[in-house]
């Protein structure tokens, strides 16, 4: 009995942090989404579903689809780059591997805003003679550059566990490189792929700084929409309803990835 009371007392700070820092703000957002915006931009305690009805308009549904497409595109591009780099890291000596990982992580020693502005200056140079600044593809490249370590590190941690003998055995049995990747390499690194996809897709869905700066206002996503609703339009119910739907989408995406991870565990 004393031990249970002590454990409950020790876990109390965590539950307080969970209630005040996570559950509390989410509850405020959900309640606000059902309130009414006054003509002067204030929130009135009149419960209604007008904010959710507004979101199901074609204009806002199209905004959701564009944001989902941008997040999915960034996830696919980031994973496509991180996979071969993670595999290359496993073939290096420990010293070279440490130096390369350090070079990859060095940009994260600076502010996120500084990294975005620096990448904007790089795009302004028009590498390969292609105009990328203030374009959709430029935004995608900037997001990929900033989110690449979030995909690379979990992929590398999982790929490094694959025994070289398994790949060599597949080569001895006559498997092609594509067969080795799809039938050996990919299944054994599936957990890292799931974690990397979650770490990239979920924050990409609400990204607003990169589309706003690199896109020059031409790439309009959910993050920019939320900023305008809370700061400019002062339509807090509509912004809260949008956030509530984003939370639902995030939970669905996390559930999807976790289900695949559970299937992977069952296979093992």
Image (spheres, rainbow, N blue to C red):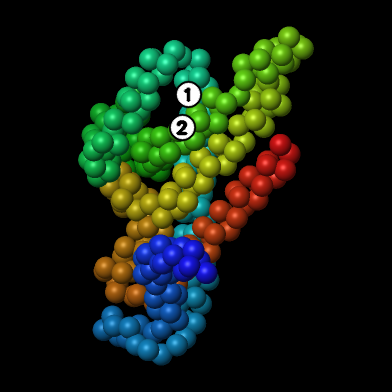
Image marks 2 and 1: residues in contact by CB distance under 8 Å: yes
Residue displayed at 64% across by 25% down: 185
Residue displayed at 77% across by 12% down: 173
Residue annotated with mark 2: 152
Query: In terms of sequence position, does the residue under pointer 2 or pointer 1 come before the other?
Result: 1
Q: Residue furthest bottom?
A: 46
Q: Is residue 162 visible?
A: yes
For mark 1, give the secondary structure. helix
Residue annotated with mark 1: 85
Q: Where is residue 168 in the image (x, y as percent from the top left)?
A: 67, 12
Q: Is residue 241 above or below residue 265?
A: below
Q: How crowded is mark 2: few (under 14 residues within 10 Å), some or many (20 or more)?
A: many
Q: Residues within 10 Å of mark 1 (few under 14, many from 20)?
A: some
Which residue is more in the foreground, 88 or 263? 263
Q: Is residue 96 above or below residue 40?
A: above
- What separation in Å lies between label 2 and label 1 (alpha carbons)? 7 Å
Q: Where is residue 18 in the image (x, y as percent from the top left)?
A: 41, 65
Residue displayed at 35% across by 28% down: 104
């Amino acid at each position: 009995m004393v031990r249970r009371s002590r454990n409950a007392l020790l876990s109390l700070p965590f539950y307080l942090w969970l209630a005040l820092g996570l559950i509390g703000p989410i509850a405020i957002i959900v309640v606000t989404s059902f309130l009414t915006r006054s003509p002067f931009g204030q929130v009135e305690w009149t419960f209604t579903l007008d904010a959710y009805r507004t979101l199901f308009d074609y204009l806002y549904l199209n905004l959701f689809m564009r944001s989902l497409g941008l997040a999915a595109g960034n996830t696919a591009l980031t994973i496509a780059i991180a996979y071969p780099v993670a595999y290359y890291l496993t073939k290096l000596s420990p010293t070279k591997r440490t130096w390369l990982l350090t070079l990859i992580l060095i940009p994260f020693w600076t502010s996120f805003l500084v990294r975005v502005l620096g990448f904007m200056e790089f795009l302004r140079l028009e590498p390969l003679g292609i105009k990328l600044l203030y374009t959709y593809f430029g935004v995608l490249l900037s997001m990929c550059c900033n989110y690449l370590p979030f995909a690379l590190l979990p992929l590398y941690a999982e790929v490094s566990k694959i025994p070289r003998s398994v790949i060599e055995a597949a080569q001895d049995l006559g498997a092609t490189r594509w067969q080795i990747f799809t039938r050996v390499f990919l299944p054994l690194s599936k957990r890292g792929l799931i974690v990397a996809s979650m770490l990239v897709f979920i924050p990409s869905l609400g990204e607003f700084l990169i589309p706003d700066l690199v896109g020059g206002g031409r790439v309009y996503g959910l993050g920019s929409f939320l900023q305008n609703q809370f700061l400019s339009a002062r339509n807090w119910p509509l912004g809260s309803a949008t956030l509530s739907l984003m939370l639902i989408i995030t939970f669905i995406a996390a559930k999807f990835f976790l289900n695949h991870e559970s299937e992977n565990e069952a296979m093992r």
